[in-house]
Amino acid sequence: MARVAERLLEELRTMGNTAPARVFQAPGRVNLIGEHTDYNLGFVMPIALDLACTAAIAPRADGTLRIVSLNMGETHEVAAADLASLSPRKHWSDYVIGAAREVLALGFPISGADVVLESTVPVGAGLSSSAAIEVSTALAFLGGRSLDRMELVKLARRAENDFAGMPCGIMDQYISVFGEKGQAILIDCRDLGCEAVPLPYDVSIVAVNSMVKHELGSSAYANRVRECAEAVAVFDGRIGGIESLRDVNAEQFTHWDEYIPETPRRRARHVIGENERVLAFRDACERHDKPEMGSLFYRSHKSMRDDYEISCEEIDFLVETAMALEGCHGARMTGGGFGGCTVNLLRPDAVERFRSAMDGAYRKRFGITPVFYECHPAAGARELAIA
Ligand code: ADP
Ligand code: MG
């Protein structure tokens, strides 16, 4: 049995719960390219990581739902019977309660239980610790009752949208469920189809955590969603039949963009260009064209920085520093923005030098030690153990 499963089961026993238990795990992800395109029903290309949230569950007879995050060192208790009437608290437990409510809403009864979770996904770093917690706990609450995997994805997203209050798209939950070992996944966020994309064998993917997260993050995210909708309304008025930025191509954008106010226009330019970059990146992967893959990374970054305006000083510094290093094909911010991680495409023999150069430069400039993650595409959510 996996070490983490043993540890969580032990924790349940220490809490005095000796009932039969089950353990589920769901990964975080790094998005290679396609940022803020998911809620615009476009394309994204993430990989699931071997960083994951693990959740163990065992029933309780008293109807209490006791949720423990070992990372937070906190316990939160509610009555299972009250689930449907609870309100969010702006607390980490919202993600878990949100998942429980959605499982319940699909008609699966939830009774009292102890739920213990522990995650190796860095929290709030743009590697989707939130989807990892939603998917792993949703599976725990399902407790082996079968649910279509796409329904699981949608359920977990609703938990984040409707209870945790974050208007995110579907990418994070999708890749956490459908990740494949050794492959990136190109997701079409409109029809929810996907395609596994093998990455060239001689590229290493390294995420660098800036260790900063600027606070405007969540309100800025909602603003971007709204600004994109403003652009859609103008295109729809002019062209007709436009439901999302996915329906607008580059030619139409150039033809009509003068009718869109400045800010929504730049947001739309990012999204429309980014969709094209995702498809071009897939093609470049297939050709093993590393210079083009790297160039698409950097163009994506500049678009996020200048048009979508979701980067920040620390992230721009990490990207520029990486781009100047020998053996780095390309670098860009990944995740929602305003801090978090960059993702870098490296020649495998350059990884060690990259780490020490980036570490030295970032510490010198900001006095912060960055954290590095070598990213190997991993499989999606699964059950780890029954005990
Ligand atoms: P990201 O998904 O990029 O990591 P989010 O802001 O979407 O960032 O989600 C981070 C939030 O998810 C945290 O603030 C916390 O509420 C919750 N969370 C993630 N992992 C854990 C964990 N191990 N224990 C408790 N809460 C967690
Ligand atoms: Mg998240």
Image (spheres, rainbow, N blue to C red):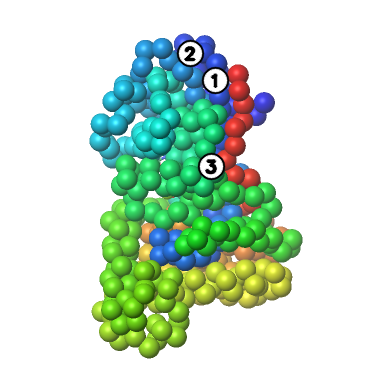
- Please, is residue 42 above or below residue 134 in the view? below
Quadrant hosting residue 330: bottom right
- Work out whether mark 3 precedes mark 2 in sequence or the reverse, and give the earlier one: 2
Q: Amino acid at mark 2?
A: Asn
User: For the residue labelled by badge 2, is the local secondary structure a helix, a strand or a loop?
Assistant: loop
Which residue appears at 40% of the width and 60% of the height? 39
- The answer to whether residue 272 is visible is yes
Question: Residue 11, how many percent across, how many down?
Answer: 51, 19
Q: Amino acid at mark 1?
A: Ala
Question: Residue 123, how many percent across, how many down?
Answer: 44, 43
Q: Which residue is mark 2?
A: 17
- Please, is residue 174 above or below residue 269 in the view? above
Q: Which residue is mark 3?
A: 148
Q: For the residues labelled 1 and 2, say whether their Cβ atoms are less than 8 Å apart.
A: yes
Which residue appears at 65% of the width and 29% of the height? 2
Q: For the residues labelled 3 and 2, say whether their Cβ atoms are less than 8 Å apart.
A: no
Query: Could you say which is closer to the camera, residue 104 or residue 351?
Result: 104
Q: How many marks?
A: 3
Question: Residue 198, how many percent across, how many down?
Answer: 69, 60
Camera-nearest label, 1 or 2? 1
Q: Which residue is mark 1?
A: 21
Question: Residue 28, how many percent across, how many down?
Answer: 53, 46
Which residue appears at 49% of the width and 31% of the height? 142
User: For the residue labelled by badge 3, is the local secondary structure a helix, a strand or a loop?
Assistant: loop
Q: For the residue carrying disc 1, how many other residues have a C-alpha within 10 Å: few (<14), some (14-19), or many (20+)?
A: many
